[in-house]
Amino acid sequence: MAVQKPESGPQTAARTPVWARARTGGRGPQPSLSVDSIVTAAVALADAEGVEAVSMRRIASELGVGTMSLYRYVETKDDLLDLMTDQVMGEDTADPDAADPGSRADWREDLRGLAVRYRLLMLRHPWVLPIGASRMPLGPNVMRRTELLFGVLDGLGLEAQQIAELTGTVVAFVRGVVLAETAEAELIRRTGQTEDDYRRSVGPYLMQVLAAGEHPRMARFVREGDDHSDRDREFLRGLDLVLDGVEVGLARLRAD
């Protein structure tokens, strides 16, 4: 994840990041309210109903307070999304296995562990994926997680950009897998149609098309493929292939 450096010339005025502002409730705050309680309620709502359900009015209702009282703690919806993202990104960074990724001198195992935990986090909070894939908020937990990620390959003689590219390849794989998994879950939630339901509905059409013999590779996959593959096992197999590629790239870069 690269941070763009300031450039000269006219620029759109940017608001100060929420973490650089005083976190206070202003005058006469609600005793039961805090930034953390608001963010925790918003995360729970997003997990249950999707991020589109998150609004100041809805959170105020969940907490049993007036809507305007929330603005003493969180100024805008964008600030709230940044705080929500950073909160969930800190969920497993206290894991002893994640505390010092370079301590075992086994970068592959460390990177594999971080990738596995990252997938589980994204599956718990699928609404985070589109936010993190575009412009991840640079809160303290996001920066701590990035520091852990970069630390896996630090000390191996690589340039900073090379470390970012190699670790970024693994992160991109995890995000791609999770995107497919969460999209399937969302489709089932929206339509009520499971994967088996879908296969039954398209089965006759698909078999008719494949019987014409114009798609022999697809026909072979239908015959031999696993109809109910283990998602976890598939992810680990794919992750190991990606790590094989990282290992080759790492050796090439170190040789150069």
Image (cartoon, rainbow, N blue to C red):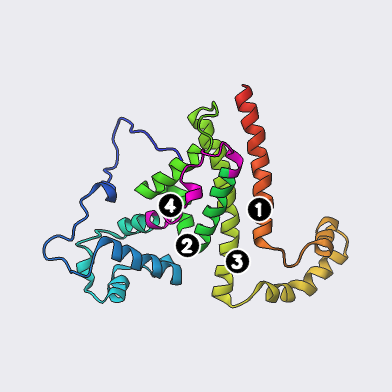
Q: Residues within 10 Å of mark 3 (few under 14, many from 20)?
A: some
- Magenta residue span: 86-109
**Alpha carbon separation for disc pair 4 and 2:** 18 Å
Q: Which residue is mark 2?
A: 125
**Alpha carbon separation for disc pair 3 and 4:** 30 Å
Where is residue 245 drawn, in percent x and y? 66, 38
Among the two numbered marks 1 and 2 on one chain, the one whose residue lies closer to the N terminus: 2
Q: Residue at x 64, y 29 (%)?
A: 251
Q: Is residue 100 magenta?
A: yes
**Residue type (three-letter) at the residue carrying disc 3:** Glu
Q: Which quarter of the picture shows residue 246?
A: top right
**Residue type (three-letter) at the residue carrying disc 4:** Ala
Q: Which residue is mark 1?
A: 236
Task: Say whether residue 9 is visible.
Answer: yes
Where is residue 19 drawn, in percent x and y? 28, 49
Disc 1, SS:
helix
Among the two numbered marks 4 and 1 on one chain, the one whose residue lies closer to the N terminus: 4
- Mark 4 or mark 1: which is in front? 4
Check contact, mark 3 vs mark 1: CB within 8 A.
no
- Mark 2 or mark 3: which is in front? 2
Q: Which residue is mark 4?
A: 94
Disc 4, SS:
loop
Q: Which residue is mark 3?
A: 184
**Alpha carbon separation for disc pair 3 and 1:** 19 Å
Q: Residues within 10 Å of mark 4 (few under 14, many from 20)?
A: few
Among the two numbered marks 3 and 4 on one chain, the one whose residue lies closer to the N terminus: 4
**Residue type (three-letter) at the residue carrying disc 2:** His
Q: Residue at x 61, y 41 (%)?
A: 108
